[in-house]
Image (cartoon, rainbow, N blue to C red):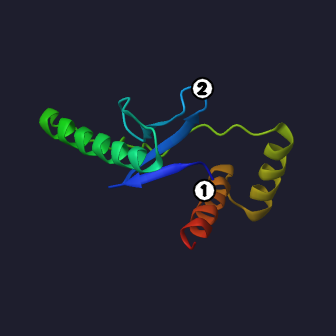
Amino acid sequence: MKDVLTYKEFIGVIHFSSKDDMFYGKIEGINDLVTFEGNSVSELKNSFKEAVDDYIELCQKAKKEPIKSFKGTFNVRLTPELHKKAFKLATTEGISLNQFVQKAIEHEVGQHLKL
């Protein structure tokens, strides 16, 4: 699991710079670049929440959705060997490769949401 913060449906991915002795991050799942930083964990968390609140306010003023929209399609890169195995399994189950991948993702998401 990556180091992440969550607040109001937003996810912030965080990192640490040993050179600057600072935590920093950016909000993921939006169409803009919004960053935040802090010298301590509590400062970082506060900075993240402020960044989210400011971003929501800016989006409201601009009359735009703050969360990125998802089309439901994306490219998946696999090793040729895994691709072949997935194709064989999907075919023997009588489903398309897309359906096979969707079932696998649904299973993984379901497992993680149970935690």
Q: Is residue 82 left or right of residue 27?
A: right
Residue found at the far right of this picture: 81
Residue found at the far bottom of this picture: 114
Marks 2/1 in contact by CB < 8 Å: the verdict is: no
Kindly identify which residue carries mark 1.
102
Of residues 102 and 63, the one nearer the viewer is: 63
Q: Is residue 27 left or right of residue 14?
A: left
Residue at x 63% of width, y 62% of height: 108
Residue at x 60% of width, y 48% of height: 2
The local crowd at label 2, few if under 14, some if 14 to 19, many if 20 or more residues have their Cα within 10 Å, is few
Among numbered discs 2 and 1, the one appearing first in the sequence? 2
Q: Where is residue 24 shown, x and y percent of the image?
A: 48, 35
The local crowd at label 1, few if under 14, some if 14 to 19, many if 20 or more residues have their Cα within 10 Å, is few
Note whether 36 is above or below 105 in the view shown: above
Q: Secondary structure at mark 1?
A: helix
Q: Is residue 103 left or right of residue 94?
A: left
Q: Where is residue 104 shown, x and y percent of the image?
A: 66, 59
Kindly identify which residue carries mark 2.
19
For residue 6, what is the image quadrant?
Answer: bottom left
How many angstroms separate mark 2 from mark 1 (CA)? 42 Å
Note whether 15 is above or below 92 in the view shown: above
Q: Which mark is on residue 24? A: none
Of residues 35 and 40, the one nearer the viewer is: 40
Q: Secondary structure at mark 2?
A: loop
Residue at x 36% of width, y 32% of height: 34
Note whether 108 is above or below 6 in the view shown: below
Of residues 112 and 76, the one nearer the viewer is: 112
Quadrant of the snapshot with the C terminus: bottom right
Q: Where is residue 23 shown, x and y percent of the image?
A: 50, 38
Which three-letter amino acid code belongs to the residue tagged 1? Gln
Which three-letter amino acid code belongs to the residue tagged 2? Lys
Q: Where is residue 19 shown, x and y percent of the image?
A: 59, 26
